[in-house]
Amino acid sequence: MYSCILLTNPAAPALNLTTADALRSAWGGGDLKWLALGEAAEFTVESVPSNQWDVWQGLQTQGIDLIVTPAEGRQKKMLLADMDSTMIQQECIDELADVAGVGERVKEITAKAMNGELDFEGALTERVGLLKDLPESVIQQVIDERISFMPGGKALLATMKDAGAYCALVSGGFTAFTGFVAEALGFDENRANRLLVEDGKLVGKPGLPILGREAKVRALEEITARLGLAHDEVIAVGDGANDLGMLKLAGFGVALHAKPSVAAECEIRINHGDLSALLYVQGYAKSEFAGV
């Protein structure tokens, strides 16, 4: 059996009974279950519909995401999450660069790296080089003035941890930011790159080794081995090309507001929902969310 989940942006609910029930009827699905009225609903089918992606495309124009997953084993025991543009709404290095006055150049490199057009390690080294001699205090300034959490993140962490899941934050960004985000949201551990500092200023070089795509895959492998979990018991979420390895290895790999080239390689694509979508995908109803 497979679960078909329809969801939308909780801040502007666009899902109605007519749309949900029409799809359920067309696909010969089981009873419709509302996970959150107007926000998310699901039903089961016996096999993956052959026109899944045509229907998905049509629903996109209505502000609705459609996900089809195996009905068994939906609730995962581990969350592995990217940080920039995933758990937070910004790219930290872009914010640092904006303060340094080199924002446009760095944003251009970031966009190409996230699309997979540039080697991640080379792109990171080049961007960090443009931050040379920036005062270390600017890191806290960016945290205080420019960082905002992605909606749904607190409910996601609280609900999964309440159910006994392990939560890890793994980023191609920097520990100065992942430490803050991990503590604020309740992650059990975080891994990221280091910004080297000397005499109160950024050196303009990242610490080695650089954590990129393969480091995220290793994080999934190492943490699951340590906890005695199977890869299928992990839900991973990210938006960039360097997330693809972990997204493909996890039981559920979620492309959240991802670059088109990244989303195209993932079975679970969330373009309209927020991080609470990861709970709906796992079958949680909104009434079961913790910390809300």
Image: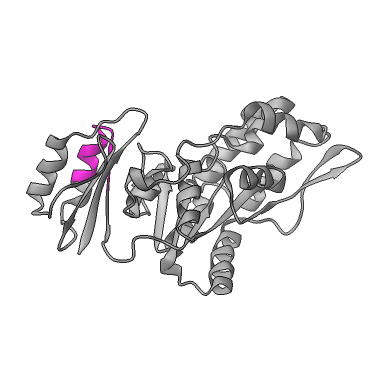
Up-down: is 228 above or below 157?
below
Rendering coords of residue 257 (x, y %):
42, 40
Extreme residue toward the right, this view: 199
Please indicate whether residue 80 sits to the left or right of residue 106 in the image.
left
Up-down: is 45 above or below 227?
above
In this rendered view, identify the residue nearer to me: 65 or 123: 65
The colour mode here is one colour
Image quarter of residue 72:
bottom left
Q: Quadrant of the N terminus?
A: bottom left
Q: Is residue 100 magenta?
A: no
Image quarter of residue 99:
top right
Please indicate whether residue 282 sits to the left or right of residue 209 in the image.
left
Rendering coords of residue 119 (x, y %):
59, 51
In this rendered view, identify the residue nearer to me: 282 or 57: 282
Up-down: is 265 above or below 185?
below
| Picture mark count | 0
Magenta region, residue range? 55-66
Rendering coords of residue 158 (x, y %):
50, 48
Rendering coords of residue 159 (x, y %):
45, 50
Which residue: 37% across, 29% down? 11
Q: Quadrant of the C terminus?
A: top left
Q: Is residue 57 magenta?
A: yes
Which residue: 34% across, 51% down? 284
Which residue: 16% across, 63% down? 47
